[in-house]
Image (cartoon, rainbow, N blue to C red):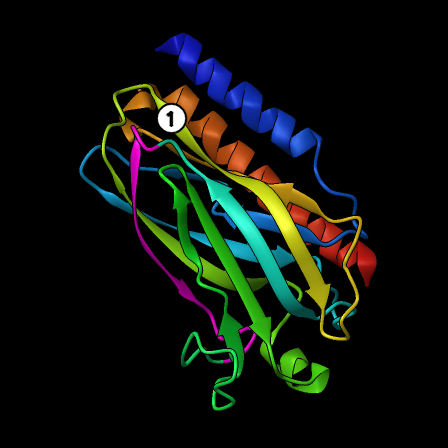
Amino acid sequence: MKLRMYQLILSLTVIFAISAPSNAVVIELSPALQVSETGESVSIDLVASDLGSPLTTVIGNYDVDIEFDDSALAFTGFSFSDALGSVISTDFFDFTSDAFDGFSGMISSTEVNLNLFSFLFESDLALLQSDSTVLATLNFDVLALDVGEFTDVTIASVNSLVDAAGFDITGFSTMDARINNPSDIASPKVAIMLSLLIAAITLRRKFLLKSKV
């Protein structure tokens, strides 16, 4: 158990150390770390961050593959935010819809594809987005997560990331998420270490935001 705990802390430290440059858009899964156990349900947001404050990048469409371990998690569904407008139907020619969902969903037993194309003008999208914008939310049931174990939900591929003017967004980075069994936190010292680490990641993101202003 101690070895697994140290592996968890080490890997999170690496995530903290090797993070995105302050001038790059980040496509991330949030929260980066959450606790759960067998039988519970969890939600993870797909987020576009470091878009600028005020906005310097407005997301117009995206296509992202997200991977998970199907022995630990069961995918139960997803929902889009209104960041690219409302999704009324999957008909591309239904112009009552603000955005087109290109048949998002499971593409294999361990992968989910989320893709959305907005019909809105850049000025309209800018009103719906901010420096850190939730694009969608994924839901999972925890099937098996024994004491001391964790499972990762990762961004397997960003197939497309385009701004509201139709230009490809390049130089972006990605950040994954981890779900840990809370029973692994067996001692107050370990709990404090994890709390400090999560706080450090949060503070660093706030620092990067201020450094860009």
Residue 3 placement, left or right of 131:
left
Q: Quadrant of residue 125?
A: bottom right
In percent of the image, x 25 and y 22: which residue is there?
146
- Image spot of residue 75 (x, y percent): 31, 46
Tell me: residue 167, above or below residue 188: below
In front: 174, or 53?
174
Tell me: residue 55, above or below residue 170: below
Q: Quadrant of the N terminus?
A: top left
Tell me: residue 57, above or below residue 107: below
- Image spot of residue 31 (x, y percent): 47, 46
- Image spot of residue 83 (x, y percent): 55, 73
In percent of the image, x 48 and y 86: which residue is there?
94
Are there few (<14), some (14-19), or many (20+) residues within 10 Å of tag 1? many
The residue labelled by disc 1 is: 150
In percent of the image, x 58 and y 56: which residue is there?
63
**Which residue is outermost to the left?**
39
Q: What amino acid type is highlighted by mark number 1? A: Phe
Start-end of magenta stretch? 70-85
Disc 1 element: strand
